[in-house]
């Protein structure tokens, strides 16, 4: 939903220039993703049942010998999984279902909470199975629809880029210097929504990558692509669609109330009238698959804190599903504010740990270069 609704929120609050700061965030994010994923894979732990668990809590504890810092990160990860990985997703689903089909938000929360429970009790293999079927199909449909709109309005693509670059340091002239579109707000919300979209530096991705059978450095190299594809490619496509459709100010007025997903839906409807229905399905499936992933992140942190037992596991999963119901009904503004605060809180210990471990990452990279050189010879 960061790629769909988050981009609209960034443009609404910070003007088109917010997209530029999303790009900058992605560039730095490619570096932080590489480092955190490499370290997360290197210091992962093999459990008694043969499964793998990893993430910043492990490399902070093992590499830095700071158990307390690992506990702090795990606690923040657990809270973030509920507050950032769960509630904004269900909130967007409930909003779009209510807007497009008049489905009560509480009903959406109850239904998806029950469905989520059925899936997550099956563990990571069931989560991966469901998510791997959802994402590619809807991704292609969403991307294809966006390309149709850009093809229909190809003459407005360059002016849209001009709107982004011309206001990077000045704010949006379209609203007469309104604070919401000033340089400071463009920077703030471009970075915030960019980080929300690609998760770079938060410490969530290493938990997923740790379960891979590849080498540590291989996973780190692969992860570099994530912020690029997610933010530089997909978010830019969404942004261009919105900016082009909003040329006459009919989609949103900068500084006025916006919901994010609704504005993106209106932008697509300017060229493909029936596409909001497809977009609704895409939002639901994207958001739901994100909730599945974050349920796993939070579970690993929970088990790190409270031990690995069925009681601990089911306690967390029940709490996570209950928060789905609550998140469907609260206001979007409160959810976004809490989400941003949690992302920041979780990033601090993770990034400090990555800076301290920079030499270890360099050693791994040098070994990788040597391996590639020997292989090529």
Image (cartoon, rainbow, N blue to C red):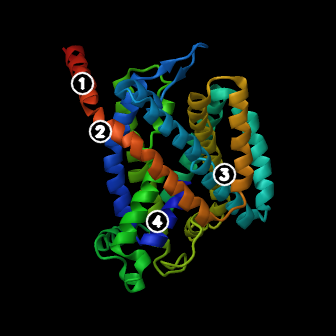
Q: Which residue is mark 1?
A: 363
Q: Are marks 2 and 4 in contact (CB under 8 Å)?
A: no
Q: CA distance from mark 2 to mark 4?
A: 29 Å
Circle 1 — which element? Answer: helix
| Between marks 3 and 1 in the image, the one whose residue lies nearer the viewer | 1
Q: Neighbour class for label 1 at 10 Å: few (<14), some, many (≥20)?
A: few
Question: Mark 3 and 1 residues: CB-CB less than 8 Å, in contact?
Answer: no
Residue reaching furthest to the front: 68
Using the numbered discs, state the Cα–Cα distance from disc 4 to disc 3 in whole angstroms: 20 Å
Q: Nearer the viewer, residue 176 or 272?
A: 176
Residue 197 in sight: no
Q: Give the spatial CA distance, label 2 vs label 1.
A: 14 Å
Q: Assign the N terminus to one quadrant of the image.
A: bottom right
Residue 15 placed where, x, y %?
Answer: 41, 72
Distance from Cα at disc 1 to Cα at disc 4: 38 Å
The residue tagged 2 is: 355
> Can you identify the residue that label 4 sits on?
10
Which of the 4 image quarters holds residue 174? bottom left
Going from the N terminus, do you reach mark 2 or mark 3 first? Answer: 3
Q: Earlier in the sequence, mark 3 or mark 1?
A: 3
């Amino acid at each position: 939903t960061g790629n769909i609704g988050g981009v609209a929120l960034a443009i609404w609050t910070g003007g088109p220039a917010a997209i530029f700061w999303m790009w900058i965030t992605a560039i730095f994010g490619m570096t932080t993703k590489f480092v955190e994923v490499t370290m997360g894979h290197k210091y992962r732990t093999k459990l008694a049942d043969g499964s793998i668990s990893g993430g910043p809590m492990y490399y902070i504890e093992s590499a830095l010998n700071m158990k307390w810092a690992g506990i702090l990160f795990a606690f923040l990860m657990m809270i973030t999984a509920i507050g950032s990985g769960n509630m904004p997703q269900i909130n967007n689903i409930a909003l779009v279902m209510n807007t497009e089909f008049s489905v009560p938000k509480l009903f959406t929360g109850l239904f998806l909470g029950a469905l989520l429970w059925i899936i997550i009790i099956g563990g990571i293999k069931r989560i991966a199975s469901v998510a791997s079927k959802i994402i590619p199909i809807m991704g292609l449909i969403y991307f294809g629809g966006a390309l149709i709109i850009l093809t229909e309005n190809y003459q407005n693509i360059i002016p849209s880029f001009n709107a982004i670059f011309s206001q990077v340091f000045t704010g949006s002239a379209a609203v007469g210097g309104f604070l919401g579109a000033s340089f400071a707000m463009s920077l703030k919300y471009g970075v915030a929504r960019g980080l929300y979209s690609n998760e770079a530096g938060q410490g969530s991705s290493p938990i997923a990558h740790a379960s891979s059978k590849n080498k540590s450095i291989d996973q780190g190299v692969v992860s570099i692509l994530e912020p690029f594809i997610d933010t530089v490619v997909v978010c830019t496509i969404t942004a261009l669609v919105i900016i082009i459709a909003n040329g006459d100010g009919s989609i949103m007025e900068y500084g006025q109330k916006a919901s994010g997903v609704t504005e993106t839906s209106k932008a697509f409807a300017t060229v493909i009238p029936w596409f909001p229905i497809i977009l609704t399905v895409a939002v639901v499936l994207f958001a739901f698959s994100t909730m599945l992933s974050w349920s796993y992140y939070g579970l690993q942190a929970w088990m790190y804190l409270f031990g690995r037992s069925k009681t601990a596991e089911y306690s967390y999963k029940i709490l996570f599903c209950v928060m789905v119901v609550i998140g469907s009904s609260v206001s979007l503004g409160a959810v976004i504010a809490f989400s941003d605060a949690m992302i920041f809180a979780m990033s601090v210990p993770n990034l400090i740990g990555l800076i301290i471990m920079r030499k270890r990452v360099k050693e791994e990279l040098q070994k990788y270069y040597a391996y590639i050189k020997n292989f090529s010879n």
